[in-house]
Amino acid sequence: QVQLVESGGGSVQFGGSLRLSCAASGFSISTYAMRWYRQVPGKEREWIAAIFGAGSITNYADSVKGRFTISTDNNKSTLYLQMNSLKPEDTAVYYCNTFVGRKDYWGQGTQVTVSS
């Protein structure tokens, strides 16, 4: 059974850093693409980062490129999102995602709040 559980969210001031974690179970994260999304109330969920090829390939949305880093620890079956130089517009609920066996899986989300 595929499960994704995010953690690491919280409140931080402008310019601060946070690291989000997504503990995965029921599949091998080195085999499947893993993604981070975020969502603000009243807006569509926004893709922000992806990692493929057992961690060898990464892609980022322009809004976070150069500030966020996606990575995996295959031994711990955990996906990470290191977020630096945070801005108030990064405030959102952050979700990890994967597509396994023709089905989309999402975690429960973790809130990130950046104050100015």
Image (cartoon, rainbow, N blue to C red):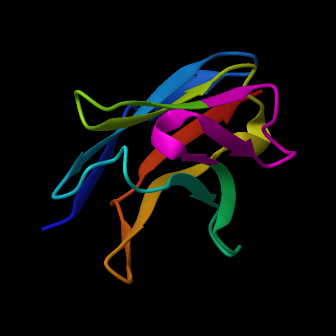
Q: How many marks?
A: 0
Along the horizontal axis of the image, is 109 left or right of 49?
A: left
Q: Residue at x 26, y 50 (%)?
A: 28
Instruction: State which quarter of the image contains the N terminus.
Output: bottom left
Residue placed most toward the observer, 91 or 24: 24
Instruction: State which quarter of the image contains the C terminus.
Output: top right
Magenta region: 50-69
Is 63 above or below relative to 85?
below
Q: Residue at x 61, y 18 (%)?
A: 17
Quadrant of residue 26 within the rendered picture:
bottom left
Along the horizontal axis of the image, is 66 left or right of 95?
A: right
Q: Position of residue 33 (x, y in %)?
A: 49, 55
Q: Residue at x 45, y 60 (%)?
A: 97
Residue placed most toward the observer, 102 or 105: 102
Is 89 above or below relative to 15?
below
Q: Is residue 38 magenta?
A: no
Residue placed most toward the observer, 36 or 30: 30
Q: Is residue 56 magenta?
A: yes
**Quick one: which residue is furthest to the bottom in this view?**
102
Is 87 above or below relative to 44?
above
Is 38 above or below relative to 73?
below
Q: Residue at x 87, y 45 (%)?
A: 62
**Quick one: which residue is furthest to the right in this view?**
62
Along the horizontal axis of the image, is 28 left or right of 39?
A: left
Quadrant of residue 88 within the rendered picture:
top right
Q: Position of residue 81 (x, y in %)?
A: 53, 33
Q: Position of residue 114 (x, y in %)?
A: 66, 32
